[in-house]
Image (cartoon, rainbow, N blue to C red):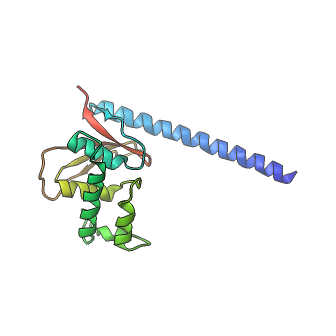
Amino acid sequence: MNTIIGMVLEVGKAKKNMELNNAKNELNRQRLNERMEILGLKEKRVIPGDGNCQFASVSDQLFDTLEHANLVRRRAIDWLIKNKNWRLPNGAVLSDFAHDQSWDEFCGELGRNGIWGNHLTLVAIAEYFGSKIYVISSVDGEYLINISPTITKSQKLILLSHYAEYHYGSLAINK
């Protein structure tokens, strides 16, 4: 009998947590949409939520197609491997972010299909392609992220949305 009551209580807790997460996710989505509207931006196209969204979004921005997402990922990972001692503006060294593994293992994992991109891959993309990246995020607080390359090679801006912890999107100016 106690086992059944315990199971019912656990299901109730799980349901309540799921409802709280759904409400938080909806708030984040609404916040991102409001920010995009204020900035005069809209989604350029639907980006698949397959774990490759950051790279597909950048591919869309640079090449006007999602077809080069793997190329963008490879270029970013190659840049990270070659620049493990590169310092971020805050003084941190890239290789410091590989906590429980070697830098090569860390980059190897990031290079796999379906593995989410992160801030380091955005830095690598900005540096490799020489383009400024602007990210509008759903996070509470500071939501505009600007990543500028050391040397600007292209005047093409990469405009991304970031639905925090879930998805990157490709943005366009709302005309």
* Residue 17 rendering spot, x and y as whole percentages: 62, 45
Residue 168 shown left or right of residue 173 in the figure = right
> Quick check: 56 above or below 75?
above
Farthest-out residue, bottom: 102
**Going 18% across and 50% down the picture, which residue do you hit?**
131
**Going 32% across and 34% down the picture, which residue do you hit?**
45
Residue 168 shown left or right of residue 157 in the figure = right
Q: Dividing the picture into quarters, in which one does residue 135 lie? A: top left
Residue 49 appearing in the image? yes
* Residue 28 rendering spot, x and y as whole percentages: 45, 39
> Quick check: 110 above or below 34?
below
Question: Which of the pair 55/67 is nearer the observer?
Answer: 67
* Residue 46 rendering spot, x and y as whole percentages: 36, 35
Farthest-out residue, front: 67
Farthest-out residue, right: 1
Number of callouts? 0
Question: Which of the pair 117/64 is nearer the observer?
Answer: 64
**Going 82% across and 48% down the picture, which residue do you hit?**
5
> Quick check: 16 above or below 34?
below
Question: Which of the pair 101/147 is nearer the observer?
Answer: 101
* Residue 77 rendering spot, x and y as whole percentages: 29, 61
Q: Dividing the picture into quarters, in which one does residue 106 lie? A: bottom left
